[in-house]
Image (cartoon, rainbow, N blue to C red):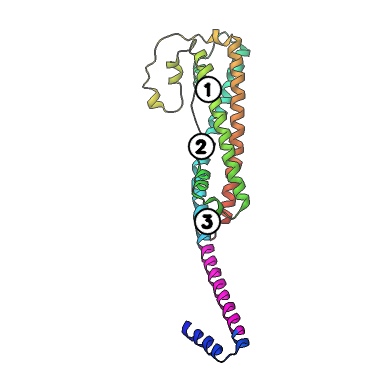
Amino acid sequence: MIKFFRKIRYNLMSEHKTGKYLKYAIGEIVLVVIGILIALSINNWNQQQLDAKEEQRILSSIIQDIELSKFLYTQGKWLSNKTLNSTTALLEMVEVRKEELDEDSLNYHIDRLTRRWFSSTPTSFYDALINSGEFKLIASYELRDELTSLKSNQEFLGIYEGIGQQFVDGQLNPYINQYINRSQTNRKSTTNGPIRNRVPEVTHKSNYAKMLNEKKFTNLMVEFNEHTFNTISNYLRLEKNIAKIDSLASASIKN
C-alpha cells in the first residue's frame, strides 16, 4: 500500500502536476490523521471497557469488605450500649444507697465497664484503593465522597476508642481495684464463660459499700458515660456511611 501511494506521488511530480500533487499530499495527510484518530478512539474504547470491568470488580469487593465493618460497628455499638446501661445502673445504686447491696448485680456491671472492644483499624479498603490507584476508577462521585467520609469517621472512632480505653486503664481500673475482688467480677461475665471460669475465685472481700459512697466513683461513672456516649455517636455515623456505601455500590453493579 505504501509503495502504491509512493508511486502516485512520483508520477505526479514527474509530470510536473504540482497542484494535484499538493492536493494529493494533503489528502494523504488527512487520511493518516483520520487513521490515527480512529486508532486512538479504538484504544480509548478498549481502555474504557477494561476500566468498566475493573470498576465492577472493585464495587463487588467493596460490598464484600463492608460486611466485616458492619459486624464490627454493630457489635461495638451493642457493647457500648451495654456499658452505658451499666454506668447508669451503678449511678442509680449510688443514689439509692441500699443497706444490702446486690453483689451479683454489682459484679456484673463492674465487669461490663472493663470490657475491651476495638472496631477501628489503622487501614481500610479505602486505603487499599488509594494506594493502588483504583479509587479513580469508581465512576460515582457520591460513592467516592462516602468512602472518604467513612475513612474520616473511622479515624475519629479510633481516637474516641483510644481515649475511652486510656480512661479505663489509667483511671477506672486502678480505682476499682482498690475495692473490688476482680476474680469475682470476672466470673460473672456473660461471655467467654469457659475461658473466664478458668480464673479461680479468690476469697478476698470486696468493699462495694465504701466504693459507692465515694464521690470519686460517681465522677468516674459520669465521665465514663460521656466517653461511651461519644463512641456510640461515632458508631451511628459509621453505620449510616456503611448503609449508603452498600446502597450506592450495589446500584452501580451491572447485572
Q: CA distance from mark 1 to mark 3?
A: 41 Å
Quarter where residue 48 is shown? bottom right
The answer to which of 42 and 82 lies nearer the viewer is 42
How many residues crowd around disc 3 within 10 Å: few (fewer than 14), some, or many (20 or more)? many
Q: Amino acid at mark 2?
A: Leu
Instruction: State the image coordinates of residue 65 (x, y, percent, origin top left).
Output: 49, 46
Q: Amino acid at mark 1?
A: Gln
What element does badge 1 sit on?
Answer: helix
Query: Is 48 within the magenta?
Result: yes
Residue tagged 3? 55
Which of label 2 and label 3 is nearer to you?
Answer: 3
The mark that comes first in sequence, 2 or 3, is: 3
Q: Residue at x 54, y 65 (%)?
A: 44
Please indicate whether residue 114 sits to the left or right of residue 200 in the image.
right
Quarter where residue 231 is shown? top right
Query: Is 4 within the magenta?
Result: no
Q: Residue at x 54, y 60 (%)?
A: 254
How many residues crowd around disc 1 within 10 Å: few (fewer than 14), some, or many (20 or more)? few
What element does badge 2 sit on?
Answer: helix
Residue tagged 2? 72
The answer to which of 44 and 158 lies nearer the viewer is 44
- State the extent of the magenta-drawn residues as a range: 22-49
- Which numbered circle lies on residue 17? none
- Which numbered circle lies on residue 166? 1
Q: CA distance from mark 2 to mark 3?
A: 26 Å
